[in-house]
Amino acid sequence: MAETETKPGEKAGEKGKEAPQPRSVRVVMMALMVTILLAMLDNMIVSPAMPTIVGDLGGMEHLSWVVTAYMLATAASTPIWGKLGDMYGRKGVFLTSIVIFLLGSVLSGMAQDMGQLIGFRAVQGLGAGGLMVGVMAIIGELVTPRERGKYMGMMTGVMAVAMIGGPLVGGTITDHLGWRWAFYINLPLGAVALAMVTAVLHLPKKKAEGRIDYLGAALLTVGISSLVLVTTWGGTEYAWTSTVIMELIAIGVVALIGFVIVQKKAAEPILPLHIFRSLNFTLMSVIGFLTGFVMFGAMLFLPLYQQAVQGASATNSGLLLLPMLLSMMVVSFFSGRFTTSTGKYKIFPIAGTVLMVLGLFLLAQMDTDTSRFTSGLYMAVLGAGMGCLMQITMLVAQNSVEMKDMGVASSSATLFRTLGSSFGVAIMGALFNSRVEDTMASRAGELGGKVTEQSAQLDADSLARLAAPVRDAYQHAVSAGTHSAFLLGAVIGVAALVAALFVKEVPLRGAAPKDSEPKDSGSGDEKPAGDAAGDAAPGAREAVAEAV
């Protein structure tokens, strides 16, 4: 279906109205960045408070559920929030997710025992599932993909600030105000986000044409929850071959198969399968999963290596990742600007995966004699690769679907990255632990086996109490463990590189700077989202921008 040509500055179907000033969009972006900060800071702040929480509430045996309940609720609700935004309008759904997140924060801060805290963290995670998805989907509706690159560096910068400053803020709050304020700190940030979003964001209201696919939502929730529990419990709470893990795998597989069958028949599917007909969308989902696998595994083991082998302080754990995060932020900013000015993006998935493989291979070469400067350079290479991939994967995924599916595209991309991180931490962690235990047994004999029989990851106090020969053996064991983990990461990175080579450079929607349109370098079977039959994406976006 042919679309009516709309000139820049005109609302769809209406002539003569001026386009919104860039400042209006920037004000909306500020509100969305506050929300991203809210979502990213939570776990970073809460983690340092965990020992104090256990000391106050007890229930050490249930401690892992404080994190697991949050992760489960976040992962399971992510695709549902995206679909709700598509059906009922993004602003109302987005504000609802913020309110639920803040309610869960207040209740978590008021918890009187571990059971209450676990339940309230689930409520908080339920709201958190809609925060990042809401931000990405709103940006996708408000800003054309061609212009969206300008905001990539901003989003990555906020994430980097949260990763670096979160543990520092969490430790300071816990020491001076008490652990409950690790949750209450969300309230002022959340209030700012609510006020700004309510005041400056105006999006067209939508009326759902169908009913929510409750059966599909239930099956997807069961499937995702089972997979997350497998990756969380496998090798820690239960052996990988235990009955519990096998049952969870079976439940997850059956639920996801049932989900696919239901989606084919549902009038309003939670995750429309037709979006996977786009080669680019499918490839971005794969690359996002593999990037999440590698990135969060690296963020887990790099501080451990620096603390155990290089003698760094655990207090400033966020600062240990500074070379990687700064590199990621700078490259993401550059890639966004380049994409906006040229309309080209295929180079970044390829360059990003190449740098990711190189960085992981270099990190795998670290041993007990590697200096902090050298490891910092290796981390910067990995960070540069991540900077090329972090936001480009979301941008291309959104550009590959019609406007009506923007929410489910954003939630799917976020979900695949989340699942990738769960699998990455679990599988790389299992490999790391096995290598550490084997190396300790070979270098320190029976004593080495006893040291790591409870956990292959020792805290600073436990490490300091070890005899010098055993401590030396443990440092070599951690070095060997990180070598294996990062080598596995490099192999996963190669798989991501293969996927990146098949990405088609479909022109990004939106006018180029100074009205210079990019040449069509994509093939005829892949079209930008706004070009699909019956989709009035360009006009709809003008209407959104006009309302800002």
Image: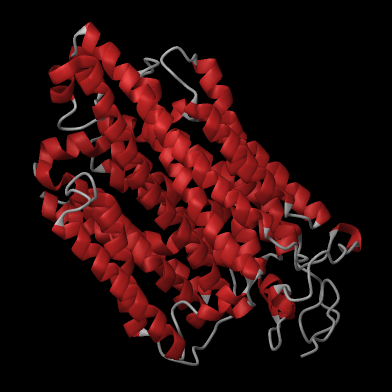
> Image point 29% across, 64% down: which residue?
225
Question: Which quadrant is home to the C terminus?
Answer: bottom right
Q: Position of residue 537 (x, y in %)?
A: 70, 78
Vertical placement of residue 364 versus 248, above or below? above
Q: Using the rendered view, name the quadrant where residue 46 is placed.
A: top left
Vertical placement of residue 431 versus 499, above or below? above
> Image point 45% across, 12% down: which residue?
369
* Residue found farthest to the front: 442
Q: Position of residue 269 (x, y in %)?
A: 45, 83
Question: Which quadrant is home to the N terminus?
Answer: bottom right
Q: In the image shown, does 459 or 151 lie closer to the viewer?
A: 459
> Image point 58% across, 40% down: which residue?
356
Q: Is residue 420 in sight in this rendering?
A: yes
Q: Position of residue 9 (x, y in %)?
A: 82, 72
Is 85 displayed left or right of 99 in the figure?
Answer: right
Q: Using the rendered view, name the quadrant where residue 203 is placed.
A: bottom right
Q: How is the image coloured?
A: secondary structure
> Image point 65% across, 37% down: which residue?
330
Q: In the image shown, does 140 or 224 lie closer to the viewer?
A: 224
* Residue found farthest to the top: 468
Vertical placement of residue 87 versus 201, above or below? below
Is 366 displayed left or right of 387 in the figure?
Answer: left
Q: In the image shown, does 527 or 497 lie closer to the viewer?
A: 497
Q: Is residue 266 in sight in this rendering?
A: no
Q: Position of residue 538 (x, y in %)?
A: 74, 76
